[in-house]
Amino acid sequence: MAWAHAVGGTRYVFDDLKTLLARATPERSGDQLAGIAARSAAERMAARWALAELPLAHFLTEAVVPYETDEVTRLVVDTHDAAAFAPVAHLTVGGFRDWLLSDAADSARLAALAPGLTPEMVAAVSKLMRHQDLMLVAKKCRVVTRFRNTLGLPGRLAVRLQPNHPTDDLRGVAASILDGLMYGCGDAVIGINPAGDHLAGIGALLRLLDELIQRHDIPTQGCVLTHVTNTLQLIEQGYPVDLVFQSVAGTEAANAGFGITLAMLSEAREAALSLKRGTLGDHVMYFETGQGSALSANAHHGVDQQTLEARAQAVARHFRPLLANTVVGFIGPEYLADGRQIVRAGLEDHFTGKLLGLPIGCDVCYTNHADADSDDMDTLMTLLATAGVTFIMGVPGADDIMLNYQSTSFHDAAALRRLLGLPRAPEFDAWLARVGITADDGTLLPAPARHALLADLSGLR
């Protein structure tokens, strides 16, 4: 089915749904690289007009990636909740935008609607929205998850403490963990990207995290972000695994490039659940996504990268994760060229994730060869925190010396808390006050008082 719309006396025709979605997308280098972006601002506007008039129900009849050849499409179609979709089934994409921005779309209605929305629907409506629209709707969405603490409560901001080390040196990792704890970071997860892929080394990192958390009774969870097959082997060998991590993408072919299938993710989730390590809940999965991953694997099927990002989020949603985040600027300027495109993509990813019912966070980041800087990241992290993002990253000095990219720091999180009055997960806040890192109101105590704890905390082997 084709769609057409005229702008400035020129009639633009869009041959199918994936072409319409691609042409309506805000400018970004990845879609230009793929040869699917609008060729002019006029064509982009014509596509948006045509998209606004498209009935939401059409997304249930036309797939952007064929059902017969793609298990992500099959997951989306086969798990769609028609009853949840019914309240908005009569709307167009433009009408859906208006409804989302209305007072009728409150937190309870948005939560009930989430199972009825496909990723293509939420991607489509995001293309019609300004930044403030994306923020206003996302802030209304409530997605609460639990393992050893409670994440996603309104008016709170969590931080993943990311203590990566270029050689996985345990003392170096431990030093970064202590640094982050002194800043009150780590309630989302203490999550290490290992430099190596050897099971013994990954297992040592898992034992380090477990010893720290158990010895000091910290209400948080640890994770080593290795491949899901490694985690399965480590569980079988008796290592202390809290969360199973995996990067996921929006097509079966892109996930094959990651070396995963949906069945593999299901197996890993069941294995983690069998350990019963959570004290407050059973959300045991942690996923990362990022615009451009399918294109970089030549597995995009001519679909724009933001729609594919929403499809990756639908994969993550299916497995009820504790956490999911978009690593928004990590893949590089070939996909998001500069600070402006990174900011837009981060707000889109947060919006689509929240609307789909995902506990979405963001690695507010850029690579050193992108046309972006820390001021751009300050802008994005502040906009996201205002819009109710579940968590951001805490990296020593904002400079990840193992992955070689720029993210957000422990003191960035402290600045956001002071600026916007955002406390941490309640159980983690209580622990920080109990051990003397913060005052009862959650503010960090002066450095000498916090540093007095180091002698005890640094007793880790």
Image: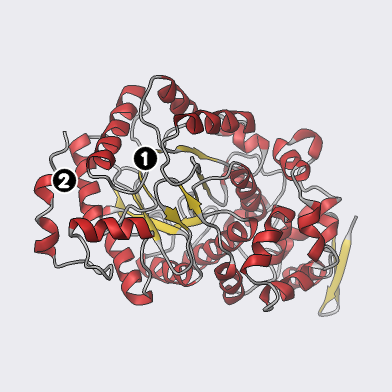
Q: Which residue is disc 1 drawn over?
A: 193
Q: Quadrant of the N terminus?
A: bottom right
As helix, strand or loop, the secondary structure at mark 2 comes to helix
Residue 59 image offset from top left, x and y in percent: 81, 55
Is residue 446 at all visible to an observer of this figure? yes
Residue pointed to by mark 2: 457
How busy is the neighbourhood of tag 1: few (under 14 within 10 Å), some, or many (20 plus)? some
Between 71 and 157, the residue placed more toward the observer is 157
Residue closer to the observer: 73 or 86: 86
Q: Which mark is residue 358?
A: none
Amino acid carrying label 1: it is: Asn
The residues tagged by marks 2 and 1 sit, at their Cα atoms, a distance apart of 22 Å
Furthest residue in direction right, as rendered: 1
Judged left or right of residue 429, residue 172 is left
Question: Residue at left 28%, top 67%?
Answer: 442
Check disc 2 and give the amino acid type.
Answer: Leu
Please tell me whether mark 2 or mark 1 is closer to you in this view: 2
Graded by Cα atoms within 10 Å as few (under 14), some (14 to 19) or many (20 or more), the crowding at tag 2 reads some
Q: Is residue 264 above or below residue 337?
A: above
| In front of the other: 61 or 66 | 61
User: Image height check: is 331 above or below 342?
Assistant: above
Q: Which comes sooner in the sequence, label 2 or label 1?
A: 1
Please provide percent x and percent y for residue 336: 53, 58
Quadrant for the C terminus in the image: top left
- Residue 266, quarter of the rendered image: top right
Give the image location of residue 372, x and y in percent.
42, 64
Q: Is residue 365 visible?
A: no
